[in-house]
Image (cartoon, grey):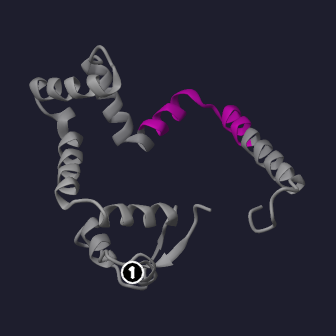
Amino acid sequence: MFYNPMTIADLHQRFPGVNWLDFIQRSLPESVTVGEDEVVIVSVPHHLTNLLNLMKNTDTRILANYLLWRASSSVIPYLSDSARDVQFQFTSKVSGQSEKPPKWRECVGLTTSTLAHAVGSLYVKQYFNEDARTQAIKMFQDIHDSFISLLTEADWMDPDTK
């Protein structure tokens, strides 16, 4: 189940060791404040438990190096060609990728990932007419109905899982 609502106070109790209120508050703009009674959704609680155990059992220097790597690698696309070349050397060793993608492809990828909703909206406005939209909604509904039907027939699942 990917929908697990809980308050920040519940988060503190269930996943101790992290000041969740402070973490969440610092992740938001200064103009937004939350309290212990704020409800958050924890998609995969088991993952959070495993992550906290891993962090507790990992040397702090390794954690710091990992965080620094994640922070620095996220800005490499915006840096000079020489910085991007260093990243490509690393990536090519790890992935086996033999040539660097052209700059235009990187720019399109960054734009699409950063502005996903805006790009998607433009695509839909350009290529989806009302008939295509209606067909897509019907297709989704048919898939949903078939899934529910198959789920109802599944005798190997208990009712809570269904």
Image: 57 above or below 104: below
Mark 1: amino acid: His
**Residue occupied by mark 1:** 12
Report the span colored magenta: 119-137
Q: Where is residue 72 shown, x and y percent of the image?
A: 17, 43
Q: Secondary structure at mark 1?
A: helix
Question: In the rendered image, which quarter is residue 135 located in?
Answer: top right
Q: In front here: 130 or 113?
A: 113
Residue at x 39%, y 61% (from the top left corner): 51
Residue at x 18%, y 35% (from the top left corner): 76
Residue 65 colored in magenta in the image: no
Residue 122 colored in magenta in the image: yes
Q: In front here: 17 or 102?
A: 17
Image: 73 above or below 34: above
Q: In front here: 145 or 90?
A: 90
Residue at x 83%, y 45% (from the top left corner): 146
